[in-house]
Image (tube, rainbow, N blue to C red):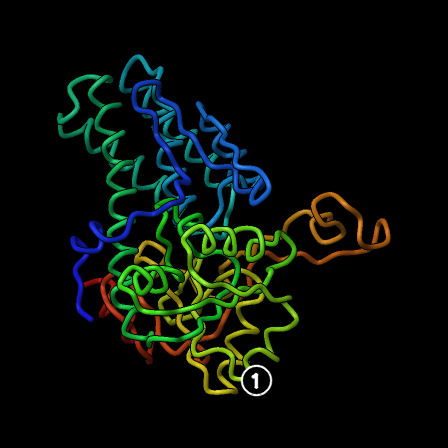
């Protein structure tokens, strides 16, 4: 079934709104994902420090959503600036603060770098004649990042639709839906949502995704809100579910993809890819081109580790002996040999990735 992004915008109206920018009052409002699904609460942010804290504390999470949030965090840094020098200095400081919040998510540093570079260009070429115009133009740039992400996700959904048949069941990992991207659509869930909007029956199996339970708390919440059939399983049930032919494909998002096809995504993704490879179940990573890191090698990438108490407890309730040693990596890396294809807004990339990644994302 052929459909355009323009047509999809008319058909599909997301029911989840994770990021809201109040242009009149210069406030960034986020749906607090750390409180879902039990509470629907919002946090108002007015400084880059508050934005950084929200990213660190997982009030907003998912690489694209973090990128959009960081872009608005950069805007917030210059709201009270009196001149260009002060504004550019504030932007540089904000970039340093924000980049440290989640080091593995490449969208974050991409967004802050873009916003800082754009501000310098606007000042240097005279397009911003005063600091007030600079602020207005930077707000427009942040909005462009949001709009571009939305368009990219809808286009990914269209490409991903090629990999879905009526009646399919898709296994995912973590939450790579609209909550993770800030748009209400998503990356890994984009084909599922596009299919649903077009009347194609598709269901999802969502592992719980310990230790933050993004699968059970967020993916299940999001899909149920959209009216899409979803089944929750324990992380440890992934192998059996695939062995019993309950899954037609695996679709995951990504926080970083290297030029040779290594995919960094939420911990547990590698396991799904290996099992899928052994059982002949296709594994697809879906991400916008902003998620690609064309410079780093595997040995260069820092895998973020978080607080041991995230593993020792569940929502603050102890489940392990106090003081036990914990290893808590947030992401894992899936080697290219286990990746069937990478789906982007510019097209579907197939192996060999060291040759084809650049052909697609740089065109």
Query: Image check: 46 left or right of 328?
Result: left
Task: Determine the residue located farthest toward the bottom in the rendered image.
Answer: 279
Give the secondary structure at mark 1.
helix
Q: Is residue 302 visible?
A: yes
Q: Quadrant of the C terminus?
A: bottom left
Query: Image check: 39 left or right of 144?
Result: right
Residue 341: percent from left, percent from top: 35, 75
Query: Image check: 16 left or right of 355?
Result: right
Residue drawn at the location 57% of the way across and 37% of the way down: 39
Q: Quadrant of the N terminus?
A: bottom left
In the image, 239 versus 354, the foreground residue is: 239
Where on the picture, by quarter, is residue 201?
A: bottom left
Where on the picture, by quarter, is residue 327?
A: bottom right
Q: Is residue 216 above or below residue 74?
A: below
Residue drawn at the location 71% of the way across and 54% of the way down: 311
Task: Determine the residue located farthest toward the right in the rendered image.
Answer: 321
In the image, 260 versus 186, the foreground residue is: 186
Q: Is residue 77 above or below residue 345?
A: above
Q: Is residue 293 visible?
A: no
């Amino acid at each position: 079934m052929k459909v355009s992004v323009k047509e999809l915008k008319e058909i599909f109206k997301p029911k989840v709104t994770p990021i809201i920018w109040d242009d009149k009052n210069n406030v960034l409002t986020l749906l607090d994902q750390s409180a879902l699904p039990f509470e629907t609460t919002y946090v108002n942010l007015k400084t880059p420090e508050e934005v950084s804290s929200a990213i660190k504390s997982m009030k907003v999470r998912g690489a694209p959503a973090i990128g959009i949030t960081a872009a608005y965090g950069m805007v917030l840094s210059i709201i009270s600036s009196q001149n260009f020098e002060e504004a550019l200095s504030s932007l540089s400081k904000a970039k340093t603060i924000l980049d440290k919040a989640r080091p593995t998510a490449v969208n974050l540093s991409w967004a802050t770098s873009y916003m800082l570079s754009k501000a310098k260009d606007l000042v240097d070429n005279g397009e911003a004649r005063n600091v007030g115009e600079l602020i207005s133009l930077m707000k427009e740039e942040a909005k462009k990042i949001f709009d571009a992400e939305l368009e990219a996700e809808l286009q990914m959904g269209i490409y991903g639709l090629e990999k879905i048949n009526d009646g399919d069941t898709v296994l995912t990992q973590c939450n790579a839906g609209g909550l993770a991207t800030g748009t209400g659509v998503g990356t890994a869930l984009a084909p599922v949502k596009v299919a649903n909007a077009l009347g194609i029956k598709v269901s999802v199996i969502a592992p719980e995704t310990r230790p933050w339970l993004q699968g059970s708390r967020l993916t299940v919440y999001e899909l149920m809100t959209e009216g899409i059939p979803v089944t929750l399983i324990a992380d440890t049930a992934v192998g059996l579910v695939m062995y019993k032919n309950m899954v037609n494909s695996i679709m995951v998002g990504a926080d970083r993809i290297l030029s040779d096809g290594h995919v960094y995504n939420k911990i547990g993704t590698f396991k799904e890819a290996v099992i899928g490879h052994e059982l002949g179940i296709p594994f697809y990573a879906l991400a916008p081109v902003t998620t690609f890191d064309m410079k780093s090698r595997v040995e260069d990438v820092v895998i973020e580790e978080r607080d041991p108490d995230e593993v020792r407890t569940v929502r603050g309730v102890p489940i392990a002996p106090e003081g036990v040693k914990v290893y808590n990596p947030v992401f894992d890396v899936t080697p290219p040999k286990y990746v069937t294809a990478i789906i982007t807004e510019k097209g579907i990339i197939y192996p060999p990735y060291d040759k084809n990644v650049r052909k697609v994302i740089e065109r």
